Image: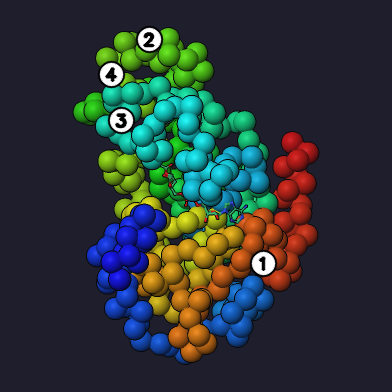
Amino acid sequence: MLLRLRMLAAQGVHPLDALRASRLQEEEPRDAVLESFDIEGVAKYMQASKCKNVVVMCGAGISTSAGIPDFRTPGSGLYDNLQRYNLSQPELIFDLAFFQSQPAPFYELCKELWPGTYRPTRAHYFIRLLEEKGVLRRCYTQNIDSLERQAGLSPEKVVAAHGNMDEAHVLDSVPERKVDIEDVRRAIFAGEEGWQALRQAHGGLVKPKIVMFGEDLPDRFWELQQQDLQECDLLIVIGTSLVVEPFAGLVGKAAPDAPRLLINREPAGTCEQRVFGFRFQLPEGDNWRDVWFEGGCDEGCHALAAALGWGEDLQRLESEAEAE
Ligand code: OAD
């Protein structure tokens, strides 16, 4: 048991959550809400139940086909490729205290990921299509690349749970002092001289509003998440390892009879790892609503669009974007 707790802790699962989850695997089974536990089953459910409150949760996996590495995939993930910054632990790049003492690595990373360099993926356009079809309640993203907005999602449909580079502020300023994002972009692109000058000009470190470990999530996340998840009639989770809290906890908050679809290369967020986690890995009878599409985010989104008869609409959105 201890070994298992250690293993889960290494994946970011708190030991108390793991212990609680092992009890909660006993969650009372319900009648199946899906005809089949696959993409077709989800599509049939969406059509039959006239789904209109779909909540999407997404992570770095939806942007890898755009050329942005994810964080934790061994080898290609960002955390395996930060040697040049000489960090004792890769997560330090998003650590507030570390940023205050050594801002350079974070600014370098901002420069690499600055919006405008990358284009949205098929998975992003699929989420936009959900909005166009009038069924998207909200898209909760952990990504800081703003590709959901670039794909055309309306601002009110997106919750950037880990912030992004649309805005910047002076660290520890009360009341908060915002800094023009174009000034910040120029300073960061000018390297150390640039961001040191910006710091001088504003009397403190200026930080794009990316949520670091040690900072709270935006108010918008806390204001919307409870009701969105309680009222959702389908949860689609795409391209995330579901190890960072409190974001990952949203999975367990979905209404108990709302189907949940995970589109990801590997399983994530299962009930062995978290409270009310996915049950797609359990024998039939113990799972009444969860589906895992094992594969690429773009492929999974394409398959669901095709099963819904929306294949051409998705194609149109992508072609229009390419033509721009
Ligand atoms: P991770 O890198 O932890 O997880 C990405 C998941 O997507 C993994 O399970 C991959 O196997 C999967 N994946 C990658 N590419 C895929 C593809 N093309 N198709 C299908 N699956 C794919 O990224 P997140 O879960 O988003 O914090 O990480 C959460 C947070 O951790 C981030 O928001 C970041 C980091 O610390 C901040 O930026 C503040």
User: Is residue 169 visible from the viewing direction of this image?
Assistant: no
User: Is 129 on the left-hand or right-hand side of 26?
Assistant: right
- Give the CA distance from mark 3 to mark 4: 15 Å
Residue 214's tag is none
- Specify whether tag 3 is near ligand 1 (CB below 8 Å): no
94 and 221: which one is in front?
Answer: 94
Q: Residue at x 33, y 10 (%)?
A: 201
In the image, is residue 224 above or below residue 32? above
Sequence-first disc among 3 and 2: 3
Image spot of residue 254 (x, y percent): 41, 69
Pick the quarter of the image with the N terminus. Answer: bottom left
Mark 4 Cα within 10 Å, few/some/many (few <14, many 20+)? some
Q: Which SS class for mark 4?
A: loop
Q: Amino acid at mark 3?
A: Phe
Between circles 3 and 2, the one closer to the viewer is 3
Foreground disc of the pair 1, 3? 3
Amino acid type for the residue under numbered disc 1: Leu
> What's the mark number on residue 204?
4
- Where in the figure is residue 258, as x and y percent of width and height? 47, 75
Whole-Å distance between the Cαs marked 1 and 3? 42 Å
Q: Name the spot of residue 183 as percent of width and height, x first.
A: 45, 17
- Answer few, some or many: residues within 10 Å of disc 3's Cα (few below 14, many 20 plus, some between 14 and 19): some
Local secondary structure at mark 3: helix
Q: Which mark is residue 98?
A: 3
Amino acid identity at mark 4? Gly
Relative side of 31 to 225, left or right? right
Disc number placed over residue 197 in the picture, else none: 2
Q: Amino acid at mark 2?
A: Ala
Report which residue position mark 1 lands on: 304
Mark 3 or 4: the one toward you: 3
x%, y% of residue 120? 64, 43
Determine whether the beta carbon of the residue marked 4 sits less than 8 angstroms from the nearest atom of ligand 1. no
